[in-house]
Image: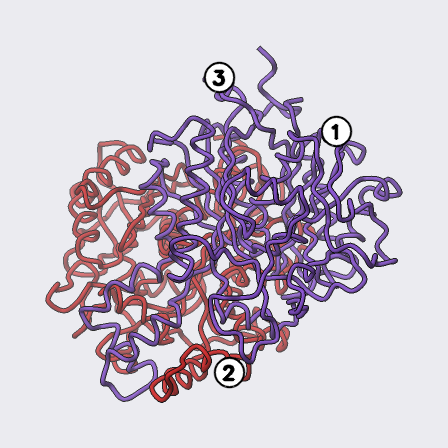
Chain colours: A purple, B red
Amino acid sequence: MAKTTDHLGRPIVVVTGIGIITSLGVGRKDNWDALSAGRSGIHEIKRFPTDELKTRICGMVDFLGSSDKGPAALTYEMAETTAIEALSEAGLDGGDFGGPLFLAAPPVELSWRDRFDLYKMSAEDAGYRRLMAGAARPEAARYFETTQFGSIADRLADRFGTKGLPITLSTACASGATAIQLGVEAIRRGEADRALAIGTDGSATAEALIRFSLLSALSMRNDEPEKASRPFSKDRDGFVLAEGSATLVLESLESAGARGAEILGVLRGCGEKADDFHRTRSKPDGSPAIAAVRAALADSGLDDTGIDYVNAHGTSTPENDKMEHLSLSTVFGERMRSIPISSNKSMIGHTLSAAGAIEAAFSLITMREGVIPPTINYDNPDPAIELDVVPNVKRPADVRTVLSNSFGFGGQNACLVMAREPA
Amino acid sequence: MSPRDVVITGIGLVSSLGEGNEVHWQRMTTASPSPVIDSERFAPFTVHPLPAIDWNLQIAKRGDQRQMETWQRLGTYVAGLALDDAGIKTDESLCATMDMIVAAGGGERDQEVDEAILAASLETNDRRLLLNQKLMTDLRPTLFLAQLSNLLAGNISIVHKVTGSSRTFMGEEGAGVAAVETAAARIRSGQSTHALVGAAFQTEHPDMLLAHVLGRHLQRGPWQPVWDRDPAQGGGLVTGSGGAFLVLESREHAEKRGARIYAWIEDILSDRVRRADGGLETRLREMAAKLSGKNGKRLAVSAASGAHEATAAEKKALEDRFALRGLTSLTGHLKEAQFPFAVAMAALAVKHRKAYPPFDGSEAAFPDEPRSVLATAVGSEHFEGMALVSAA
């Protein structure tokens, strides 16, 4: 049997199941078909009225049973659906998964619809006193679960029989990558043979949209939604708020081999580094992102010549894409001009807490299919960003390794290095 | 003893009792420790309020203070206390390589904006349009950044320059358990050398009480110790404002830099008991036995929440083998910070070689020197954790 430990003597961690939902559809096949065809899932917002809003487009998931039932319900349903797909592919869908759960999910809040309901239930004077009086009424108890940060993971743990205390985490836009990293670390420590890493985000509410809008983070290209997300273009004007989920079944190579599971790819390395510069802007010299990329490379045992393709964070904000270019050219030097790099977000938008997991899933499929999905809407290149962005059309390529970047709002950066086959 | 033992080298504490380890040790070891409570501001509920804090002592820039609300300020402040206590705060290179796991809920919402929208909602047929109008004009970016769970960690990076890594765990009391457990497991396995871990909770905001009201958690009526709350008077929780952060290091890392070691964390166990099936008490008994053997009486610092079922199960599971000290009687329930606080108090007892006196009449005396102290956090709704903290 092949070697089951890596360059540092740690168990090699592989992926044996993948599940995906984005605005492009449900399931890995539909998503990949659309993504590799360069189709955009960005559309006009239908879930709530957009009067008065500066941004009226999104990559919301509007086609599920709970799409109109509030963030908690949708966030759960997407996680459950992608987990079912991933576990079924891994052959572990018996409801007794037996490994830990790491869930990247948005922070929860009582929705406005629920706040209005509670307020109306009470006859108290006004303000929070009235809200609390409503909340104390017997018929209000059903609103409780959506206020608990641990309840989605708790339900998923019941549903899939994961082991122990499930971890729900947030590192903002890097959350999905952090969930995978936590799973990789647990397997490397020998605590588990397998782990379930899920990123999910169904939190595109009016308030969420308005918050990002007030930070001037969102694209306002409302008239051509499918053209709004244009990473690395000169005329990019912000990211597009989106929803989605991905689940990866992580497993030690030894365990996957022993049960004859098909290996979909390898999680070779993870790296992270926090930024101490500003709450919403990254350090001008790019040093935190640079350090995160370097840490992931070092962890994977590869050097700067070892990466065949970069799955970009590529949000389409003026700031991110500039900084990502700066960081990558610092790490990879001149060679960066010839390493293909593309942004899935050009088609699916920014799925926030789920993004790192969804993009890791697409990275793994990219290697297996030998096809790099394009960066669409690249018809006006930013001359300051000299990158091979795989413009507009997919490209066949022999991709053995991928670097996937996630740079979080709030200074949390995480990078993953994946490989097609165990070294 | 192993070079990769997880040792505690820094402790930061704030609660209604005051700030810092010394103050807490003093207040908690007086003959009959008494809580600081406010039963009027959020009547019929009682809270343990924040003490007066001079934020400048840990958050030097006014600009940074303005970017946060009380929850993030409090967490950043307590984290600073822990870093100071460990002698790391001014060491740039140690901070830049330090890992961090913060257990967090959400921050304070903008009460004024919320209340204006709620009031207007009664006067309109189109609440969704009202939301758009009000939020677009009234929301202030600083205030909603103050709500974001991961931005407590973000602010700690900005203010204290802790940047090795930054992770935020969510999920009430269990998040605090998982944060300490994960940081310790990483150190024990060589994935990390030193880490900052902890949480803060700010209860003095109506939105922070709202979820507890929905969950029927809060206790009404006159204050009672955590073990002795009448189910007829509510759900058993009395909340508090405060926080606890720990600096954890590998023994080797701590010794190399000549750090003072409070105690070492022998082991941590966590679980998610399916409580509806009724196995909580049995499982807690098993966890305690696995951590600390089956013989002899020990001290246990318990972060029991006061929630009736969970607290009764914990008491029944542990009281025959452990002299329990219900820290929540003195601090109030600090949510995500419950477990880090319990671990910190266990470490202080080990370091001082002295047990806390009973916090109320129902707790047994413990005259011996505590060499190993159990720290527990059993979530009011779900998730359980225990650590064994021992003399280094």
State which quarter of the image contains the C terminus of chain B: top left
Q: Nearer the viewer, residue B110 or B221?
A: B110
Q: Are marks 1 and 3 in contact (CB under 8 Å)?
A: no
Q: Which chain letter matches label 3? A: A
Q: Which residue type carries mark 2?
A: Gln
> Looking at the image, which is closer to me, B281 or B255?
B281
Residue at image point 63% right, 53% down: A40
Q: Amino acid at mark 1?
A: Asp
User: Residue at point 44% right, 29% down?
Assistant: A192
Residue placed farthest to the left in the image? Answer: B232
Q: Position of residue A110 (x, y in %)?
A: 37, 67
Which labelled disc corresponds to residue A398? 1
Q: Is residue B6 left or right of residue A165?
A: right
Tag 2 residue:
B133
Which of marks 3 and 1 precedes in the sequence?
3
| Circle 3: element type | loop
Q: Which residue is mark 3?
A: A260
